[in-house]
Amino acid sequence: MFEKLDPRSPTPLYAQIAERLRTAIVTRELTPAEALPSVRQLAATLRVNPATVVQAYRELEAEGFVEMRQGMGTYVREVSPGQRGAERERQATELVRRMLADAARLGLSVRDVTAAFERELGEQVR
Amino acid sequence: MSEYAVEIDHLTYRVKRAFTLEDLCLRIPAGSIYGFLGPNGSGKTTTIRLVLGLLRPAAGAISVLGHAIPAEAPRALKRIGYVPEAPHLDPTLSVSEAIWFHSRFYPSWDAAWAERLREAFELDPVRPFGRLSKGQKGKLMMLLALAQRPDLLVLDEPTDGLDPVVRRDMLGALLDYVAQHEATVFISSHLIHELERICDWVGVMDGGRLVADVGMERFKTGMKRLRVAHGPHDTAALPFRVLTRSPDNGSGTESWLVRDWAPEMASALAAAGGDLQQVIDLDLEEGFVELLRSFRGPAREPAHV
């Protein structure tokens, strides 16, 4: 789940960890009521600052994906279909933005990208 | 407890006339993992030895965990775990003897945990220190520093020159301890990518001075290289600081190294007539190298980071 954590990326580590967990929760790789690893465990495994893990868990709690129980640990919450839909939409938007930014860097026009997109979709349908 | 685990004020230290720390001020927030960077000979180890009371300053004040150093060093040292750059124990002492010997000095010693770490680190109890590999020596020193349950860990290049598996074991144990105990960690290393993973604060030394002292996130999000055309001559009024600027080859643009950058500042640059063409992210190592270059460069502007 955490294989591509990149400390050199400008995206802070806590945000990368939260993003991985969010995806795992939305795709049900982590199921409701399942316990997340303890802060201590995850920090030692990923070799990151425990404060970074706490920050990631807090962000997920604020977004309603997990529940932190005092002294008990952190648990995955039931995600409503609306929340899952919103999260999927956000991820799809992210994906497209990244793609368009890459395209701009390569000097590709929107038309180039759209044409390639339709070609690839055609391949997949067939 | 104070807001800072270590406070250094206007510290001066001289070795004959050759090397000096000059007017060094440094604060390590309690509970932080503070990465101490700098080229060889920049004064990192000297600063660490002063913090531990092993050297006497010519002027200035040092306070560690609320104790004045060097006057109250013995009381501070009870609460400090120290992993030196080069492990130095009696080579004839076996692993278990070294552990026993160390445990006598620290009332807070956790014998059960020391034994668990010894097993996890796969250290043979009867093997003499002198016959341990470099990695085993490093692990033993980390064990000794952790099992005393310190409030402050001072680590001088603890994993430099060790293989990745050993480094992983040592850092894993360190982070496990920090997660339980909320200790402060003061760690110097040349392994910048390793520090980048674990530190929430970085200090950069150069030539006996602290040239940067900043939260990791601010360092990483605020240090950028900008490609700018028609940049204003005077950049003092811009909301970010320009550390260096140099012309790009033939393209008519300039490369600016800046700090305290945020994306919304592009409009301020545009209002000053500058045309921002690209914002380039820097990781900690690139930021570190660029910072030293800017600080040492001939046309330098003081980098009060």
Image (tube, rainbow, N blue to C red):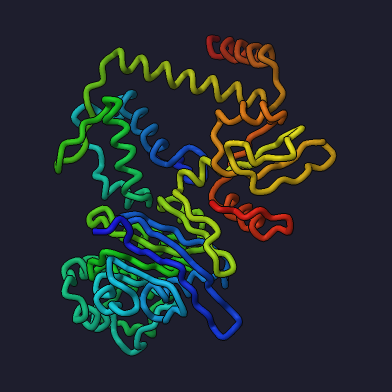
* B182 on left or right of B298: left
Q: Please determine whether, in this image, residue A122 is positioned above or below residue A41.
A: above
Residue B119 at least partly seen: no
Q: Please determine whether, in this image, residue A108 is positioned above or below residue A61.
A: above
* B51 on left or right of B189: left
Q: Position of residue B257 (x, y in %)?
A: 65, 45
Tag count in the figure? 0
Residue A4 at least partly seen: yes
Quadrant of res B116: bottom left
Q: Position of residue A120 (x, y in %)?
A: 59, 15
* B290 on left or right of B81: right
Q: Position of residue B278 (x, y in %)?
A: 67, 33
Which residue lies at the image location 73% right of the left edge and 55% below the top edge? Answer: B299
Q: Please determine whether, in this image, residue B251 is positioned above or below residue B100.
A: above
Which residue lies at the image location 44% right of the left edge and 66% below the top edge? Answer: B159
Which residue lies at the image location 30% right of the left edge and 31% below the top edge? Answer: A60
Q: Nearer the viewer, residue B30 or B12?
A: B12
Quadrant of res A101: top right
Q: Please determine whether, in this image, residue B149 is positioned above or below residue B31.
A: below
Which residue lies at the image location 27% right of the left edge and 82% below the top edge? Answer: B98
Q: Nearer the viewer, residue B132 or B267?
A: B267
Quadrant containing the N terminus of chain B is bottom left
Q: Position of residue B123 (x, y in %)?
A: 30, 73
Q: Nearer the viewer, residue B58 or B54?
A: B58
